[in-house]
Amino acid sequence: MRHTISVLVENKFGVLARIAGLFSARGYNIASLAVSETFDPQISYMTIVVEAKDAKILEQINKQLNKLIDVITVTDFTKKEHLDRELVLAKINYAPKDKARLESIFDKFVGKIIHHKGDTAIIEAVGDQQQIGELLEALNKFGIKELVRTGKLAISN
């Protein structure tokens, strides 16, 4: 089962490597990882999605993260109300006649065409994992040439 954890850390050299090493050494898979500075450039916010088969493994991950010296706080969103989003950029086949069809798709999803050149368009969209999955299914009709996604971002309500 996938679990979302946020970690507030000191923005120092090697912190990301130590956290990744913690997961690697214990054989835990990181399914998604997003990291960025906060308002304070000395602090970074990490959102980690991890595969954990049971609550005991998740508890162990949280304890190990809290032991790291550069970790300020750890928040496990498993049982907390929260919002999460992903960003996707997709390069698709595109013809001007497709614009209306694409816009009707974007009426259902938070997305837009951010660039088009020749027979290719690049779209961006934001949503939860299910919404992004549904959007990609709809975009398959156009032909997806390339796809990149951010990791999940999460914040408590």
Image: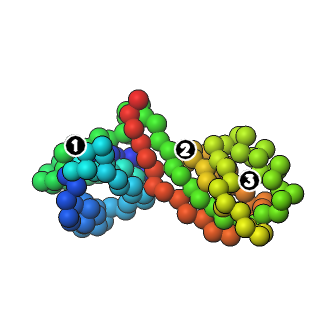
Residue 140 showing in the rendered view: yes
Give the residue at x 31% y 46%. Answer: 38
The residue that label 2 is drawn on is 128
The residue that label 1 is drawn on is 73
Around disc 3, counting alpha carbons within 10 Å, would you say few (fewer than 14), some (14 to 19), or many (20 or more)?
A: some
- The span from disc 2 to disc 3 (Cα, nearest Å) is 16 Å
Can you give x and y, in whole percent of width and height, for residue 155 in the image?
A: 39, 38
- The span from disc 3 to disc 1 (Cα, nearest Å) is 39 Å
Work out which quarter of the rendered image holds the C terminus and state it: top left
- The span from disc 2 to disc 1 (Cα, nearest Å) is 24 Å
Around disc 1, counting alpha carbons within 10 Å, would you say few (fewer than 14), some (14 to 19), or many (20 or more)?
A: few
Which amino acid does the dot numbered 2 rest on? Asp
Question: Mark 3 or mark 1, which has the lower sequence index?
Answer: 1
Around disc 2, counting alpha carbons within 10 Å, would you say few (fewer than 14), some (14 to 19), or many (20 or more)?
A: some
Can you give x and y, in whole percent of width and height, for residue 62 in the image?
A: 24, 47
Which amino acid does the dot numbered 3 rest on? Ala
